[in-house]
Image: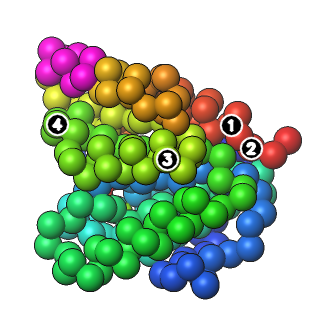
Amino acid sequence: LFAGPCDFFHGAQQLEQLPDPGEPEVAFAGRSNVGKSSLINAVTGRRSLARASSEPGRTKQLNFFNLANKLVLVDMPGYGFAKAARAVKEDWQEMMFSYLRGRPNLRRVILLLDSRIETKASDREVMELFDLAAINFQVVLTKCDSVKPRAEKARYQNVMEEVGRHPAAHPVVIPTSSETGRGIPELRAELAGFAQP
Ligand code: GTP
Ligand code: MG
């Protein structure tokens, strides 16, 4: 699945622009700058399939990537980006949730949380919305290369407790680093479970 062809095939800025539902989809969501685009590059083994940037708010539309015609990965814009205008944030939230709620072929949302930063109110809101809409999600901790083991352990335990309170959450949390490749095989195994045979 990850060794085969892998292409960007669609970008959507509005709901009307979504591609017709096809292969099973997994969406990557999380705060701006948490590392969504970098993680998609890491799991697909491409250096710059998805555009990553140190500047928050880099991804501005839903980007759809096709893996061997068996699975679609969706790179989402980040939420919680303080600098964005309020109207822009509301538009994007509405678009994001309409997509997540109404997508028949969406199998799971990978929710990225930064291993270095506490869970924010915006992350909690998103998890609550996933519960309400019964959207299956799984938490991945990002940037684990830049946190000390002891701090990572504390953060991990915290997140595990949090995940335990959300009925829509998958119980397994995966610590990852797009820089070192840590956790990428585990994440690939999860994704492969959703691929069309
Ligand atoms: P938006 O598109 O703005 O929502 O951001 P994003 O979540 O797609 O984040 P992106 O992948 O663009 O990465 C943001 C910044 O974090 C970049 O400077 C990346 O190089 C850095 N980054 C991403 N993953 C890792 C990681 O595993 N380790 C470290 N140290 N830095 C990372
Ligand atoms: Mg991005």
| Distance between mark 2 and mark 4 Cα atoms | 32 Å
The amino acid on which the numbered mark 2 sits, given as a three-letter code, is: Ala
User: Residue 79 versus residue 166: which sits nearer the camera?
Assistant: 166
The amino acid on which the numbered mark 3 sits, given as a three-letter code, is: Leu
| Label of residue 118 in the image | 4
Q: Where does residue 162 sit, x and y in percent of width and height?
A: 32, 27
Residue denoted by label 3: 132
**111 in relation to 188, above or below:** below
Q: Residue at x 46, y 66 (%)?
A: 96
| Label of residue 66 in the image | none
Give yes or no for residue 17 being in the magenta stretch.
Answer: no
- Residue placed furthest toward the right: 197
From the image, state whether disc 3 or disc 2 is nearer to you: 3
| Distance between mark 4 and mark 1 Cα atoms | 30 Å
Highlighted magenta segment, given as a residue range: 149-158
User: Residue 7 versus residue 10: which sits nearer the camera?
Assistant: 10
In the rendered image, which quarter is residue 143 located in? top left
From the image, state whether disc 4 or disc 1 is nearer to you: 4
From the image, state whether disc 2 or disc 4 is nearer to you: 4
Q: Where does residue 191 sit, x and y in percent of width and height?
A: 62, 39
Residue denoted by label 2: 195
**Residue 77 vs residue 16: left or right?**
left
The amino acid on which the numbered mark 4 sits, given as a three-letter code, is: Glu
From the image, state whether disc 4 or disc 3 is nearer to you: 3
Tag 1 and tag 3, C-beta contact below 8 Å = no
| Label of residue 192 in the image | 1
**Residue 26 vs residue 104: left or right?**
left
